[in-house]
Amino acid sequence: MKDYQRINVDHWQAQASDYVQAAERNWRTDSVAWGIWKIPNQELPLLPEDLSGSACLEIGCGAGYVSGWMAARGGDAVGIDPTPAQLCTAMRLESELKRGAKFVRGFAESLPFPDRSFDFVISEYGASLWADPHEWVPEAARVLRPGGRLVFMTCAALFQLCVKDVDTDPLTTELQRPYLGMGRLDWGPPDSVEFTLPHGEWISLLTSQDFEIEALRELGASAGARSDYDWADPKWAASWPTEEVWMVRKRSAHGLAKRTTG
Ligand SMILES: C[S@@+](CC[C@H](N)C(=O)[O-])C[C@H]1O[C@@H](n2cnc3c(N)ncnc32)[C@H](O)[C@@H]1O
């Protein structure tokens, strides 16, 4: 296990109980919404309405509600996460609500699945933030079929530049660290490790793995937006992005494959 994997599993093992209430709510809702500002799926379409016949994978599934949403939309959904306490919440809610999602323990950097076994891979602040992109992006590319889609939401690069060293402190309007060379970000205490790449590096990495970039959405707060997170400042986020979503598609051997989802 790499040092940051151990640090992050310990971190999430300790944090898991704080996320149970939100997970209970998200597992039960019909209105899928994303991220800090709860942007509805109609405005930010991370999940296709119909996933029937699609093999779907969530990497860094945490409490598993995104996997539950995919199963409810007809997908054959699997969530993977390395933290036992998070999986415990996911499995408990699945066994109660019977959406049909399956859960597996593991890291996004070494997925226990065969090549080309999924049509759709998603991460909402899972591997997309907590795993090394140079390790998990090639793994996502490996398990996706040609034409399959990868969608991930994570902290905006600009947001990570303006966060103070203690990441629960209020957001600043000054750059706190270099953009060039940004990658691994060590926070603490309590210790945790996130990964955020400059946009040019995301593009190089994704295209090197045969992904065609369909969209990059940089997201802030719209008027009246509210968040459950104390540090999320709607005034700051009216001017700058707090989070970003990448939507990419695996090329076929002969250019882009026929679209099967989305
Ligand atoms: C913000 S939480 C989960 C996000 C999920 N959407 C949720 O809200 O429940 C982040 C998750 O990433 C997981 N994680 C940390 N390191 C990981 C890695 N290397 N590979 C996959 N998942 C990882 C943690 O265990 C944690 O459950």
Image (spheres, rainbow, N blue to C red):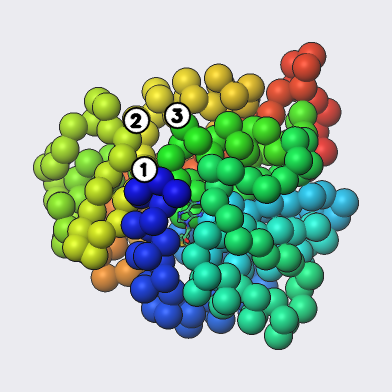
Q: How dense is the environment of label 3, judged by Cα within 10 Å: few (below 14), some, or many (20 and up)? A: some
Q: Nearer the viewer, residue 138 or 161?
A: 138
The residue beneath circle 1 is 195
**Residue 9 in the image: x percent, y percent?**
42, 61
Asked if labels 2 and 3 touch by Cβ distance under 8 angstroms, the answer is yes
Q: Determine the CA span between mark 1 and mark 2.
A: 10 Å
The amino acid pointed to by label 2 is: Pro
Q: Nearer the viewer, mark 1 or mark 2?
A: 1
Q: How dense is the environment of label 1, judged by Cα within 10 Å: few (below 14), some, or many (20 and up)? A: many
Q: In screen coordinates, is 105 left or right of 202?
A: right
**Residue 49 in the image: x percent, y percent?**
75, 56
Element type at mark 1 = strand
Element type at mark 3 = helix
Q: Quadrant of the C terminus?
A: top right
The residue beneath circle 2 is 198
Find the residue positioned furthest to the front.
1
**Residue 53 in the image: x percent, y percent?**
87, 51
Mark 3 and ligand 1: say if the CB distance to the nearest ligand atom is below 8 Å. Answer: no
The circle drawn on residue 70 is none
